[in-house]
């Protein structure tokens, strides 16, 4: 193993892409949140019922690239 691989760590991303789901209808959408924050819960427009509905985070999809 080369010494450079040991010294160079991959930088962590600041944001993650998560899947959120409406608690009323089950409509799913993708959102972006900071990596160190709690799970995402927000009120957003649900197109199936044409009203605002609470959304909760289901799972983390992937991390986003490092922003400088």
Image (spheres, rainbow, N blue to C red):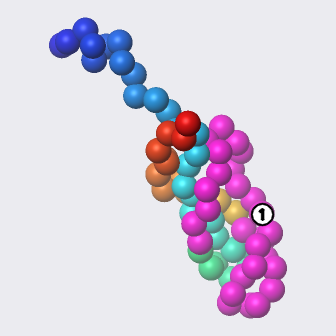
Q: Where's residue 14, x and y in %?
A: 58, 39
Q: Quadrant of the N terminus?
A: top left
State left or right for residue 58 relative to residue 22. Answer: left
Q: Where's residue 24, x and y in %?
A: 74, 79
Q: Nearer the viewer, residue 68 or 63?
A: 68
User: Which residue position is annotated with label 1?
Assistant: 42
**x 65%, y 38%: residue:** 36
Rendered view: 30 above or below 2 = below
Rendered view: 1 above or below 50 = above
Give yes or no for residue 20 being in the magenta stretch: no
Q: Secondary structure at mark 1?
A: strand
Image quadrant in which you'd find residue 35 = top right
- Name the magenta segment's main secondary structure: strand
Image quadrant in which you'd find residue 10 = top left
Image quadrant in which you'd find residue 44 = bottom right
Task: Name, please, the residue furthest toward the front.
Answer: 68
State left or right for residue 25 relative to residue 43. Answer: left
Q: Quadrant of the C terminus?
A: top right
Is residue 54 visible in the rendered structure shown here? yes
The magenta-colored residue range is 29-55
Q: Nearer the viewer, residue 33 or 19?
A: 33
**x 47%, y 44%: residue:** 65
Q: Residues within 10 Å of mark 1 (few under 14, many from 20)?
A: few
**x 57%, y 57%: residue:** 18
């Amino acid at each position: 193993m080369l010494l450079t691989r040991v010294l160079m760590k991959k930088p962590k991303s600041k944001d993650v892409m998560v899947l959120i789901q409406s608690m009323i209808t089950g409509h799913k959408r993708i959102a972006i949140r900071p990596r160190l924050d709690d799970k995402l819960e927000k009120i957003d427009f649900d197109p199936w019922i044409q009203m605002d509905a609470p959304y909760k985070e289901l799972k983390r999809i992937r991390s986003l690239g490092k922003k400088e």
